[in-house]
Image (cartoon, helix red, strand yellow):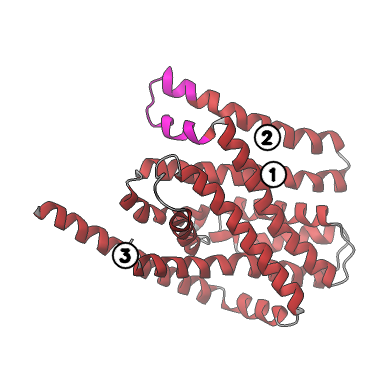
Amino acid sequence: MQMRTSKKVSISTLKTSYLIVTIVFITIIIWRNFSDIKTAIKHVENLTPSILMTSLILTLSSYASRSLRWFGYMRLKGRSTPFLTHCLIYLSGFAFTASPGKAGELMRAVYLNKLDIPFRFTFSSFVSERLLDVLAVSCLSSYFVYQIFHERLLALTLPIALILGSFCIQLVLNWLYTVKKLAYFNYIEELWTTVLLSKSWGLSILAWIFQGFILYLLLNELKADISPFLAISIYCLSLLIGAASLLPGGIGATEIGMIWLLTMVNIDNDIALIASVVTRALTLWPAMALGLISSSILQKRGL
């Protein structure tokens, strides 16, 4: 009895610590990027209400797509838990979206533990999610290759190879689990079944199209001549540049990459600067705010 009480106290302490760490982390990120935030706010204030509202709706739609993808994973273990609860848990991890490799999002395991979802499964879901994000943005980035380098064959074969290759992952995982007797891969294998992977692919592509379209809206508002397909492709490619930099949240590297790619398609440097800073502000900072709000709600609900 004493052991159970001690365990409850330790979990409760861990959840309180999670909320404190979340607040401290966001405060540090804001402090370190305060000048960029002021610049972004200045440009956001100049946006028309319709553009700002549409951009925020697209941002929330992106988060919703990713939440649905996560819910698809969690249903494999926590069938009785409602979507809203899993959505809040997933969004709580967004508070750490600016951490290196978004590894801080694993903190949501604190809440999932109470739902009897093992950390191994949470970690496997996190890895699968990150890998799918990389594959999805890589596919969407291929259009830029076609437009700039006119490599039609590469632009077509890259996404096809990535999509087909992803469906072969389950075969490899199944071999590792059944032949090599590596039990851990059983957790990952069930996340890469054909049906679940097909749904996850669709939601991943949608999520990044929603965010990339924000860049197009802003460029269009600034009278830049660019197609929505190219704008989305540039946005996704800049995310890959940011990820490759290994900087927390790709902050700085993603914006610089976006500006560089936009100037390559003859977008004025000033317009590219404004569009990149505002796009990142409308896609990154709301995520961190939602993460903090979700963590607070979960804390109040006693989860």
Q: Can you name the residue that lies furthest to the left here?
A: 2
**Where does label 1 land, which residue?**
138
- Tell me if residue 176 is in the magenta stretch: yes
Which residue is located at x 51 percent, y 76 percent? 31
Of tags 3 and 2, the one toward the viewer is 3
Left or right of residue 252: residue 81: left
- Residue range of the region highlighted in magenta in the rendering: 174-191
Q: How far across and how far down the image is residue 124, in percent?
A: 45, 40
What is the secondary structure assignment of the residue under circle 2?
Answer: helix
Which residue is located at x 52 percent, y 60 percent? 97
**Where does label 2 land, which residue?**
162
Left or right of residue 115: residue 98: right
Crowdedness near tag 3: few (<14), some (14–19) or many (≥20) residues, C-alpha within 10 Å:
few
Q: How far across and how far down the image is residue 53, in percent?
A: 70, 73
Residue situated in front as seen by the camera: 20 or 100: 20
Classify the position of the C terminus by image quarter: bottom left
Q: Assess whether mark 3 and mark 1 are in contact (beta carbons under 8 angstroms).
A: no
Q: How far across and how far down the image is residue 121, in percent?
A: 40, 41
**Where does label 3 land, which residue?**
302
As drawn, the label of residue 220 is none
Q: Reading the chain from its start, which is encountered first: label 1 or label 2?
A: 1
Which residue is located at x 59 percent, y 42 percent? 200
Three-letter code for the amino acid on which mark 2 is drawn? Leu
Image vertical order of residue 50 relative to residue 64, above or below: below
Three-letter code for the amino acid on which mark 3 is drawn? Gly
Image vertical order of residue 9 relative to residue 222, above or below: above
Q: Reading the chain from its start, which is encountered first: label 3 or label 2?
A: 2
State whether the magenta stretch is mostly helix, strand or loop: helix
Image vertical order of residue 223 relative to residue 142, above or below: below
